[in-house]
């Protein structure tokens, strides 16, 4: 397996730990979006795409944040929360779950190396370019807030 393309979307803003999003193509035929470049305590690393777990209301279908007891939309109690077997408690505690991730250390290091290389080169390009890029970035940031 080989990484054939990395697309980098720099995100310098209020969240200083999140540096960029990456879209990674494997073997010219499989794409994984929303990998993240994070500036952690031990330096830059790549986080796999993840999704926030949601508590779906059985009455109206509204997606509530995890551990909600009542629906944000209709006020009904989220019964699924109480009915769950206790063995599921640990998995439900984490609000983010990886959508795709490497299962070997070798693969993880390979992806990380390729993504961080692309991040560094994009960052250099960004520092050289005009201020119009910065305007775009601030627009994205305000949408997220
Ligand atoms: Zn509801």
Image (tube, grey):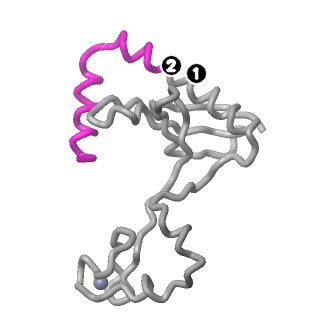
Q: Residue at the spot x=23%, y=85% of the render?
A: 75
Locate the N terminus by quadrant. Answer: top right
Mark 1 Cα within 10 Å, few/some/many (few <14, many 20+)? few
Give left or right: position of 118 versus 136.
Answer: right
Discs 1, 2 touching: Cβ within 8 Å: yes
* Marker count (numbered): 2
The front one of 63 and 93 is 93
Q: Secondary structure at mark 2?
A: helix
Which segment is the magenta one? 122-145
Residue 32: percent from the left, percent from the top? 59, 46
Q: Secondary structure at mark 1?
A: helix
Q: Residue at the spot x=55%, y=23% of the render?
A: 118
Q: Is residue 60 magenta?
A: no
Residue 83 position (above or below residue 21): below
Marker disc for residue 120: 2
Residue 85: percent from the left, percent from the top? 56, 84
Marker disc for residue 117: 1
Q: Is residue 133 magenta?
A: yes
Respond yes or no on whether mark 1 lies under 8 Å from ligand 1: no
Dominant SS of magenta comes to helix
Give left or right: position of 94 versus 103.
Answer: left
Mark 2 Cα within 10 Å, few/some/many (few <14, many 20+)? few
Residue 143: percent from the left, percent from the top? 24, 46
Residue 11 position (above or below residue 58): above
Quadrant containing ligand 1 reads bottom left
In the rendered image, which quarter is residue 136 located in? top left
Q: Residue at the spot x=43%, y=33% of the render?
A: 20
């Amino acid at each position: 397996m080989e990484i054939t393309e990395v697309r980098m979307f720099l995100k310098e803003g209020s969240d200083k730990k999140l540096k960029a999003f990456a879209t990674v193509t494997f073997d010219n035929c499989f794409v994984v979006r929303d990998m993240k470049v994070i500036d952690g305590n031990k330096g830059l690393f790549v986080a796999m795409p993840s999704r926030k777990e949601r508590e779906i209301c059985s009455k109206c279908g509204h997606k509530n944040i995890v551990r909600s007891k009542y629906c944000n939309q209709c006020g009904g109690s989220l019964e699924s929360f109480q009915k769950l077997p206790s063995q599921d408690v640990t998995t439900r505690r984490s609000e983010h779950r990886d959508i795709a991730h490497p299962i070997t250390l070798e693969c993880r290091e390979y992806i990380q190396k390729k993504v961080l290389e692309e991040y560094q080169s994009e960052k250099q390009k960004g520092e050289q370019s005009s201020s119009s890029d910065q305007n775009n970035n601030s627009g994205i940031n305000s949408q997220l807030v």
